[in-house]
Amino acid sequence: MKHPFPTRWLAAGLLATTPLGLLAQTTVAATTPTQPVAAAAAGVTQQFTLRNGMTLIVKPDRRAPTAVHMVWVRVGSMDEVDGTSGVAHVLEHMLFKGTAQLAPGEFSRRVAALGGRENAFTARDYTGYFQQIPANRLEDVMRLEADRFANNRWADDEFRREIEVVKEERRLRTEDSPRALMSEAMNAVTFVASPYRRPIIGWMSDLDALTPDDVRAFYRQWYSPANAAVVVAGDVDVKQVHALAERHYGAIAARPVPPRKPRTEPQQTGVRRLDFKAPAEQAYVSLAFKVPQLGRLDAAAPDEASAQADTDALALTVLAAVLDGYSGARLDRALTQGTDRVADSAGAWNGLMGRGPQLFVLYGTPAAGRRATEVEAALRAEVARVARDGVSDAELNRVKTQWVAGEVYKLDSVFNQARELGSHWAQGQPLDASERVIARLRAITAEQVRSVAARYFGDDQLTVGTLVPQPVPANRPSRPAPAGGRH
């Protein structure tokens, strides 16, 4: 079944998360270190603040004797400045390169010796590190992770070797992919002031110029306890996890989080177009419309305009699901089926929430003998049809039922439970954000979907990117995966 929320958020092309979290039927209890910790029933998520300001989130799940341990830092590519793009992702790599207690690579070797697996990811809004281990080895990975969070240390030579790994990663995942190249070029055209205009993995020229001290400065600036959260899910006791977290993480010295200056995206006043030429077999077209994002789910909107923007963001998410939320949805039927089909593939997604501005995207690949302009027109025609004729109750009920089923199904993964809790925290949302979002999505009406289709798809908020295929070199060499890459 096609999930209505595609895994679209790039994490340097490495790990992506869905806009919505798990539909976890949980009660979230927030406590401070001075409050008693009640024994948690299975499935109850609890949140604490450690003595140095670090957040701890614990979700017991006793179905198997395993645990997932994650550290989330509320810093990503959007916190970088021009000239050092990619530094958040490079720092993620360097956290595996040692401390005063651990040699380069020793962290991973020790986790493997515990019978665990581990990795990390960088996104626009956050950076995360995780281990999945037998539950009785939780304290071992806590000790390791707390050490590298507080005491990351490596020689300049380690940086010089690893930056070449990151550059090769960029070549493999971006420069060898015409669509990935067009996507980063399109972001640079779509956004003017927002830091979302820069690629997560960084521009190659910035990677060439990046220094060890640039990375160390970014680490000192953002890796403070008050800017991080520990998330533990699995076969654990909440009271024991809290005590372990205070022992290993709470002892890290507190430091203030630097103020974040707003970088508000100015209002767009006309269509923007990008024709991107690259060696490719097929053309491709992407239409990005600037749309409102969902505000905090645990606070009332400050005014009527903000409340309307929240409702519109949810209605746009429903519209994306009506267009492309299941096999045989509107775009599939209208563009890719029949003898006179215009596209080989077509889709839509809506950016519901995040720390930066969000987009509603329509995209498609022309069928043989059809032009990208025909696909563009057909995509817009389907939205215009919704604006004119609306959607049926049957369509709404279908996508809403699939959301609930899909979100509940994800509860089978302890890793996904931890990941979604961390994602909610990093974006400033309550831990039960998924439950709240699903409830609000289920209340969206057909008229609200028709209304947003009529109001948000004009030229003034539109950027169109078209991949213009160029001849593919006959003997283009394949590129091996980067040696030593974290992902």
Image (cartoon, helix red, strand yellow):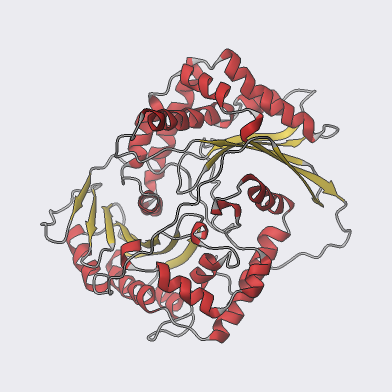
- Residue 463 drawn at (x, y percent): 67, 39
- Residue 277 drawn at (x, y percent): 81, 50
- Residue 484 drawn at (x, y percent): 58, 74
Rendered position, 410 above or below 256:
above
For the image, the number of numbered tags is 0
Left or right of residue 145, residue 446 in this image: right
Left or right of residue 430, residue 130 in this image: right
Query: What's the residue at 66%, 60% (across, down)?
Result: 173
Res. 288 image quadrant: top right
Towards the viewer: 35 or 418: 35
Left or right of residue 14, residue 367 in this image: right
Figure quadrant of the C terminus: bottom right
Q: Is any part of residue 482 visible from this angle?
A: no
Query: What's the residue at 80%, 23% (across, down)?
Result: 340
Q: Is any part of residue 417 visible from this angle?
A: yes
Query: What's the residue at 79%, 23% (across, down)?
Result: 339
Towards the viewer: 204 or 56: 204
